[in-house]
């Protein structure tokens, strides 16, 4: 793998289950590595997420072969978290190819309208004066 192709900075975390003082199981993310990657494909598609139309993202990236990512690890790339759903070892290119899926949608296509503040009309002002 040519080092000049690794232009993007990513961080890989491994989710682990720990117990707190009350015996509850909590999922925490432990830093696995921080490395450089090559973005191969970046797909965006419209999906219905919680009743809203949103753009979800899928990425395919390559990293060096000495890292040990696993399925369900979390990759942070440009502030967005992605879940690894496929790890492919490419021996000829001496790299690992990761297929990622966004954990949260980052672009909501249908923004929620905000109500505009209304001013009382003249009739409402007159009614308030008559009652008061």
Image (tube, rainbow, N blue to C red):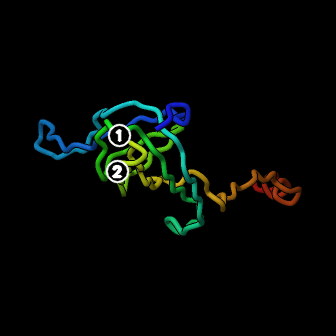
Number of numbered callouts drawn: 2
- Residue visible at 50% across and 35% down? 2
Q: Is residue 31 above or below residue 101?
A: above
Q: Secondary structure at mark 1?
A: loop
Q: In whole angstroms, how far apart are the C-alphas of marks 1 and 2?
A: 8 Å
Mark drawn on residue 2: none
Specify whether residue 132 is in view: no
Mark 2 crowd level (few <14, some 14–19, many ≥20, 10 Å Cα):
some
Residue 106: x and y, percent? 56, 51
Q: Is residue 103 left or right of residue 46?
A: left
Frontmost residue, 117 versus 114: 114
Specify whether residue 20 is in view: yes
Dot 1 and dot 2 residues touching (CB under 8 Å): yes
Q: Residue furthest front?
A: 92
- Residue visible at 38% across and 46% down? 96
- Residue visible at 53% across and 55% down? 105
Q: Earlier in the sequence, mark 1 or mark 2?
A: 1
Mark drawn on residue 65: 1
Frontmost residue, 43 versus 109: 43
- Residue visible at 81% across and 53% down? 120
Mark 1 crowd level (few <14, some 14–19, many ≥20, 10 Å Cα):
some
The residue wearing badge 2 is 89
Frontmost residue, 19 versus 42: 42
Residue 100: x and y, percent? 44, 53
Q: Is residue 48 above or below residue 111?
A: below
Q: Secondary structure at mark 2?
A: strand
Residue 101: x and y, percent? 45, 55
């Amino acid at each position: 793998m040519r080092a000049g192709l690794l232009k993007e900075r990513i961080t890989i975390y491994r989710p682990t289950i720990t117990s707190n003082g009350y015996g509850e199981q909590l999922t925490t993310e432990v830093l696995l590595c921080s490395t450089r990657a090559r973005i191969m494909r970046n797909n965006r598609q419209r999906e219905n997420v919680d009743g809203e139309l949103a753009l979800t993202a899928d990425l395919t990236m390559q990293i060096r072969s000495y890292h040990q990512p696993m399925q369900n690890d979390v990759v942070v790339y440009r502030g967005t978290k992605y879940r690894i759903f496929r790890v492919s070892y490419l021996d000829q290119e001496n790299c690992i190819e990761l297929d990622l899926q966004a954990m949260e949608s980052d672009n909501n296509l249908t923004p929620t309208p905000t109500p505009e503040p209304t001013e009382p009309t003249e009739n409402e002002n007159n009614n308030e004066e008559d009652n008061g």
